[in-house]
Amino acid sequence: MSVSEVLPIPIAMPRSITIGNFDGVHLGHRALIKRVTELSNAQTTPMVLSFDPHPREFLGIRPIPARLCSLEEKKRRINELGITEIHIQKFDKAFSDLSAEEFLKWLRDNFNPKHIVVGTNFFFGKNRGGNTQVLQEWGSQNKIHTEVLQPIEHDSIIVSSTEIRVHIQSGNIKLANKICGFDYALPMTAQHGDARGRELGFPTINSAPPQLESPALYCLPPHGVYVTLLRIENQLFPAITNFGIRPTFHNATEGEYFETHILSGWDDRLSSKHFTVYFLDRIRPEQRYSDKNELILRIQEDIKIARTLHKL
């Protein structure tokens, strides 16, 4: 599905729509999606309307939020929640210049909404000219049911993309995943390394940190060793991943890399060009060792921990 594609449902079909950026598709987003599916009640088509790039990315408004997941991962997660119609609107100059009134007309004319569900921090139109009050007044005038859902709390923590980023960047992956409701994931592109892992007895599939075409960056964890899952197409493999500069054999000027070792047995067919790594927990920070034998012993200990957490 391309960035601005709408699945082939007739425009005349009434829809129950939730609108937002949905980065990470966290528990708050899931509440919005659940509510539109409830409202649809087989009488309308439940739909998610999102944007790419993030408005702050396109407009260059600092700070630009770090991405929690790729566009493809976002769509996959939304699909998993039972939504078959996703419209990813390209956020460009023309779209950003729509006034609040023009945005609402565009929404009505293109999607025939019968229900609209948003969060409390929903703003729309040029210079954020529209808010939830404007939306609800417009909905009342046009006989469109609108709802504004309050933020979700998990273990007394208000769920937000900002909160999740804080925990990822501090290495608290387990808490970030609990708040999100999905495992933190990064898209990877395989790169040839120096075969050091294979030489040590732990072959890896490697990737530099993923990049975006927009000014934004992906949200990255601190350097360290992580319990992970590797997805290639629709297959998941239990794994362990080191992220960092590989200080035992390299220096910082040679760049950062993700090195992922499959725990269920290496197969060269796993060296796919594109794959996704899901982070489950952090084992330890990245460290420098005096020689390769000391490193091998530490890797063996890390793998033992990862296998226990994977219940292998």
Image: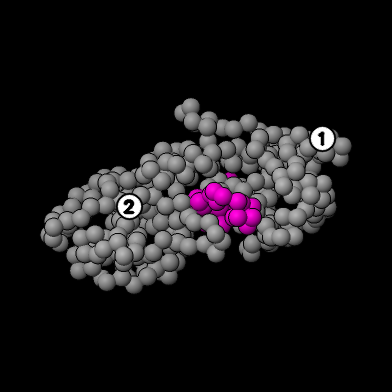
Instruction: Provide residue 19's location: percent of width, then percent of height.
Output: 68, 45
Q: Is residue 312 visible?
A: no
Element under disc 1? helix
Residue range in magenta is 54-81
Q: Residue at x 13, y 60 (%)?
A: 291
Q: Nearer the viewer, residue 207 or 213?
A: 213
Instruction: Provide residue 98's location: percent of width, then percent of height.
Output: 77, 53
Element under disc 2? loop
Q: Residue at x 54, y 59 (%)?
A: 215
Q: Is residue 140 visible?
A: yes
Specify whether 215 is left or right of 175: right
Instruction: Provide residue 156's location: percent of width, then percent of height.
Output: 48, 27
Amino acid type at image mark 2: His
Instruction: Provide residue 72's location: percent of width, then percent of height.
Output: 55, 58
Q: Looking at the picture, does residue 38 appear above or below residue 241?
A: above
Which residue is tagged 1?
Answer: 137
Q: Residue at x 71, y 60 (%)?
A: 93
Amino acid type at image mark 1: Glu
Q: Most extreme residue toward the right, as rendered?
A: 141
Q: Looking at the picture, does residue 61 appear above or below residue 133?
A: below
User: Mark 2 or mark 1, which is nearer the start of the sequence?
Assistant: 1
User: For residue 225: magenta?
Assistant: no
Q: Residue at x 70, y 39 (%)?
A: 117
Specify whether 36 is left or right of 160: right
Dividing the picture into quarters, in which one does residue 207 lie? bottom left
Which residue is tagged 2?
Answer: 223
